[in-house]
Structure formats: C-alpha cells, structure tokens
C-alpha cells in the first residue's frame, strides 16, 4: 500500500469532487465521455470503475443505464461516490481486486495507472482488469502523457526554477513524477504513448487501441472559452475526435485512453 500512502495527503484534500467541472478537467471529462460512449457495450451491463475517485464517471454511467461498482483506496472518495444514486462504492486496490473472474462487461481504470510508478504494479492492475472482465467485454485505461509535466511547468512559468527543472528533466526520462508542489499533483507515473500498448499486451490485453483525449487543446490560452457548452464546444469536440487516433497526436495529449476487447 506504499504508493497509496504517498498519494493520500493530496487526495485527502477533497479536490477530486470538483476537478472535472471546469478548465482542463472539464476537457478531460468531455473527451473521455465522448470516447467511452463510442467504445463501450450498450447499457445495461456491469461496469467496474477502478480508481473511480469521487464518482464523476460513475454518475453519468449510472444515469446512462449502466450498473456501476466503483472501487477506490481513498475513504473520502468512496464516501462521496456512495452518495450517488445507484452507485455501489467500495474500498479497494486495482492490483488486488476483490471481484469474481469474468463478472463485468466493462472495467475502467481512469486513474490508478497514474499512481503506480512500478511497472509490475501497473501490469498487476491491468491483469486484474482483464481477469474480472468477461470475454468480449472492454477494458479502458487512462494514462497521463510523459511530457505533460514539461509543458505544464513551462505554461505555468515554473520550469526555470532550478528544483522544478531538475525534477521535470528527470521525469521526461523516467516517467516518475516526483511532486514539487502538492497543490499541483502528487507522486505519479507519466506514460510514453508506446509504453501502454506493451503493458496491455503483457497483461494479456492484445489489440489495444489508443485515443488522444485532449490532443494539444489543454494548452490553449483561451481553453475555457471553448468549454462553455455552446457551438464552439461542439466544434472543439468534433475537431479533437477527428484526430484522436492519429499517432503523432499522442505525445502532446495530456491523457491517452487505451481500449482493448478481452479475448
Ligand atoms: C486523478 S484520480 C481520478 C478519479 C476518477 N477516475 C476520475 O477520473 O475522476 C485518480 C484515482 O485513482 C485512485 N487510485 C490511486 N491508486 C490506486 C490503486 N492502486 N488502485 C485503485 N485506485 C487507485 C485514487 O485514489 C484516485 O481516486
């Protein structure tokens, strides 16, 4: 549970409850939802939302008719998710799921792989997702891009600070994000876009497809004006969808969603 202890101070602040409502989080949410609505089997099927946090995705999946169980190691997140109508929320760890084999048609990992710096732990989480998902079902996992920290510290103007620069330069080589400011993020792993396909395959999830969620739009200076829910938002989502499978977009995207059908 060592990595969980390392991230609990950050998540205990309660920031996950509202994170996806505005700004970058809103873009991440809209694009994740947009892709999931096209790749998931139709409701009502059983969905295991591993690392589901405070339930932002469980809420709309349940509203769409899916039968959702959410698993998360943070008691605060589980308590919040449990207040959402229809969501069954329990404490647990992606690496050791307390679920039967083949018991879900969909397993989502929209967060756990961010916080497992050891490759063996990420493979264990993906193997568990494959184990609990029935053949023909879908495993979808989100990862944070290897170069997000570099661009983020540049945009925030913090890259020139010697300590920030030292940590960020190491991060683009190792993928391990050592937090320099707990207001920004906690211990994390940032994937190279090619790495996640190999991790899926090692966990028995072959034929995985990747989707660039935000592409470069998370860096727009006027990003929030594109997210006001009007015609511009529709146009932005159309544009990002049109290049979501283009491999040259993967490295700049803040998040990738990788999707495989269980065989
Ligand atoms: C950035 S949050 C994302 C939450 C939610 N899926 C969302 O997208 O809004 C990452 C989540 O992963 C959870 N997490 C971290 N390590 C985990 C592990 N080993 N097993 C399961 N969940 C984990 C955290 O507690 C947190 O809720």
Image (cartoon, rainbow, N blue to C red):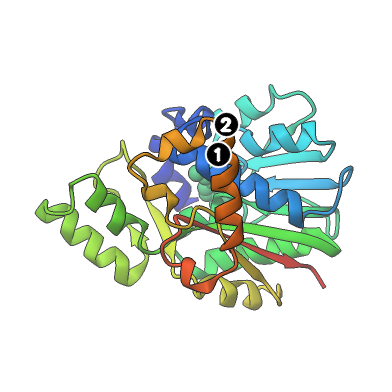
Identify the mark at residue 229; answer none if there is no mark.
2
Q: For the residue labelled by badge 2, is the local secondary structure a helix, a strand or a loop?
A: loop
Task: Give the side of residue 165 with respect to residue 22, left or right.
Answer: left
Tags 2 and 1 in contact by the CB under 8 Å rule? yes
Question: Which residue was labeled with disc 1?
Answer: 233
Residue 40 in picture, x, y percent from top left: 78, 54
Residue 73 in view: no
Looking at the rendered structure, the number of numbered marks drawn on it comes to 2
Residue 84 in picture, x, y percent from top left: 71, 24
Q: Is mark 1 within 8 Å of ligand 1?
A: no
Q: Give ligand 1's quarter of the image.
A: top right
Identify the mark at residue 132; answer none if there is no mark.
none
89 or 219: nearer the eye?
A: 219
Q: Residue at x 58, y 36 (%)?
A: 231
Which quadrant would residue 133 be assigned to in this image? bottom right
Q: Is mark 2 within 8 Å of ligand 1?
A: no
Task: Give the side of residue 61 with respect to residue 242, left or right.
Answer: right
224 or 174: nearer the eye?
A: 224
Residue 153 in view: yes
Q: For the residue labelled by badge 1, is the local secondary structure a helix, a strand or a loop?
A: helix
Residue 181 in picture, x, y percent from top left: 26, 42
**Crowd around label 2: few <14 · some 14–19 · many ≥20 (10 Å):** few
Q: CA distance from mark 2 to mark 1?
A: 5 Å
Q: Residue at x 87, y 44 (%)?
A: 43
């Amino acid at each position: 549970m060592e990595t969980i202890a390392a991230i609990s101070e950050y998540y205990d602040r309660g920031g996950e409850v509202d994170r996806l409502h505005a700004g970058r989080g809103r873009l991440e949410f809209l694009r994740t939802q947009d892709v999931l609505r096209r790749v998931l089997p139709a409701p009502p099927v059983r969905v295991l939302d591993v690392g589901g946090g405070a339930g932002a995705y469980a809420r709309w999946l349940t509203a769409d008719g899916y039968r959702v169980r959410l698993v998360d190691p943070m008691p605060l997140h589980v308590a919040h998710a449990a207040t959402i109508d229809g969501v069954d929320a329990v404490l647990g760890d992606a690496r050791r799921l307390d679920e039967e084999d083949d018991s879900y048609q969909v397993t989502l990992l929209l967060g756990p792989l961010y916080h497992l710096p050891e490759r063996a732990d990420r493979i264990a989480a993906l193997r568990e997702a494959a184990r609990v998902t029935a053949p023909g079902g879908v495993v979808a996992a989100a990862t944070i891009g290897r170069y997000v920290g570099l661009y983020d510290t540049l945009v925030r103007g913090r890259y020139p600070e010697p300590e920030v620069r030292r940590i960020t330069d190491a991060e683009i080589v190792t993928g391990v994000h050592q937090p320099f400011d707990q207001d920004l993020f906690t211990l994390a792993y940032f994937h190279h876009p090619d790495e996640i396909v190999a991790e899926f395959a090692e966990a028995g999830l072959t034929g995985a497809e990747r989707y660039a969620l935000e592409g470069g739009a998370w860096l727009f200076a006027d990003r929030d004006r594109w997210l006001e829910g009007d015609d511009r938002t529709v146009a932005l989502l159309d544009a990002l969808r049109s290049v979501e499978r283009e491999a040259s977009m993967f490295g700049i995207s803040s998040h990738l969603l990788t999707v495989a059908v269980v065989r």
